[in-house]
Image (cartoon, rainbow, N blue to C red):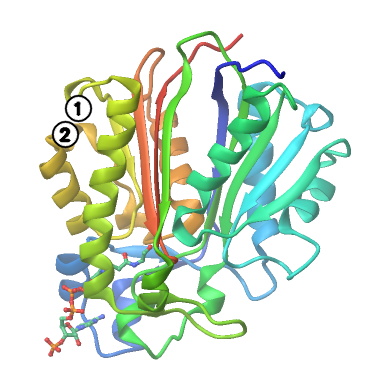
Amino acid sequence: MKRIRSVGIVGTGSYVPPNILTNSDLEKMVDTSDTWIVERTGIRERRISSPETTASCLGLPASLAALQSAGVSPEDVDLIIVATSTPDMTFPSTACFIQDKIGASRAACFDISAACTGFSYALETGQQFIATSTYKTALIVGTEVISKVIDWTDRNTCILFGDGAGAAVLQPVADNYGILATSLGADGRLASILDLPVAGCIRMSGREVFKVAVNTMIEAVEKVLDRAKISQKDVSLLIPHQANIRIIEAMGKRLNISTDRVFVNLQKYGNVSAGSTIIALDEAVKQGRVGDGDIIVIVAFGGGLTWGATVMRWGGNL
Ligand code: UT7
């Protein structure tokens, strides 16, 4: 029987491409306005990668930054899991491309497909491998070149998304630190309200997605807090999927988590799908908003529909 041990994030990194697409740029492309986009979504600009850039290109600097912040060398990585809806190829996995680029020659590699919930699914998967002592060090990456699967004539979707990548290093941590509880869910009956056909573009019934997103994310957060026996008032920082400020505000309000404890960066990047929450977590760490012993909750939803929440106590690095 394998030993169950505590597992936590011991390093984070992120990278977004330099090219900025503003709302006023979009006004010239489709029938929209900066005012509409800001009022309905909170988004002001997003990053767009160059035509030759792939998901592994963005994942590379994010991964190196995460490894550096964890003080881990690429040869020490046992496992790489990449969450993406825009892989470099159908196969090899984007994880294999990142393995080669960073020189993590010992690592097992695979990708996970759970749309915008991808990072939450990948985090829990990596956690299981380390908790059971199968592996000691996992690199979990969320990376997207979502601009390449956008219909730039569809104002319902093209204003929402942006490119970017984030990465986290997972290792064993001290007891009572790290990931305390996770809840993942899916409802395949709702597949058609948000999808990305093979060789196609993202299609979405925004209003329907909105309603399900708020309800499922609230339930997922309540479930993990209950499982970890942590009260809403003890949450130091909520890191929600950065899709729409109105979704985030509705969730914070119903969960009774004040806005100063909710991290938001969607105004700069839009919805980066599987990169969203890990880029946000990395920025929160860099801004000094995540300290030792803090209770952090990550929550996301996306195509599938899928959703997931994770509660962790930050720190406890061994
Ligand atoms: O990771 C998951 C990704 N998906 C999401 O997070 C989507 C969740 N949903 C949303 O964020 C919102 O539903 C949207 C931002 C997509 C849309 O906001 P909404 O308040 O639900 O607007 P709506 O779809 O109900 O559309 C209201 C009006 C419509 O016009 P009519 O029919 O009332 O005349 C739309 O045609 O706004 C129009 N509209 C726009 N107008 C200007 C839709 N997109 C635009 C636009 N600019 N870009």
Report crowding for label 1: few under 14, some 14 to 19, many 20 or more residues within 10 A (C-alpha): some
Q: Is mark 2 within 8 Å of ligand 1?
A: no
In the rendered view, tell whether residue 281 sits above or below residue 61.
above
In the rendered view, tell whether residue 24 sits above or below residue 40.
below
Counting the numbered discs, the total is 2
Q: Residue at x 28, y 52 (%)?
A: 216
Q: Is residue 289 visible?
A: no
> Where on the image, by quarter, is ligand 1?
bottom left
- Position of residue 140 measured from the top left corner of the image (x, y, whole percent): 62, 41
Instruction: Evaluate if marks 1 and 2 touch, with contact meaning CB atoms under 8 Å apart.
Output: yes
Q: Which amino acid, mark 1?
A: Gln
Q: Which amino acid, mark 2?
A: Ile
- Position of residue 262 measured from the top left corner of the image (x, y, whole percent): 24, 38
Q: Quadrant of the N terminus?
A: top right
Query: For numbered disc 1, what is the local secondary structure?
Result: helix
Residue 162 lies in quadrant: bottom left
Q: Is residue 230 visible?
A: yes
Q: Residue at x 36, y 88 (%)?
A: 154
In the rendered view, tell whether residue 278 sits above or below residue 131.
below
Return the mark for residue 125: none
Cα separation, mark 1 vs mark 2, equals 7 Å
Q: Residue at x 62, y 84 (%)?
A: 199
Q: Which residue is mark 2?
A: 257
Considering only order in the chain, which callout, 2 or 1, is on the residue closer to the N terminus?
A: 1
Q: Residue at x 25, y 62 (%)?
A: 212
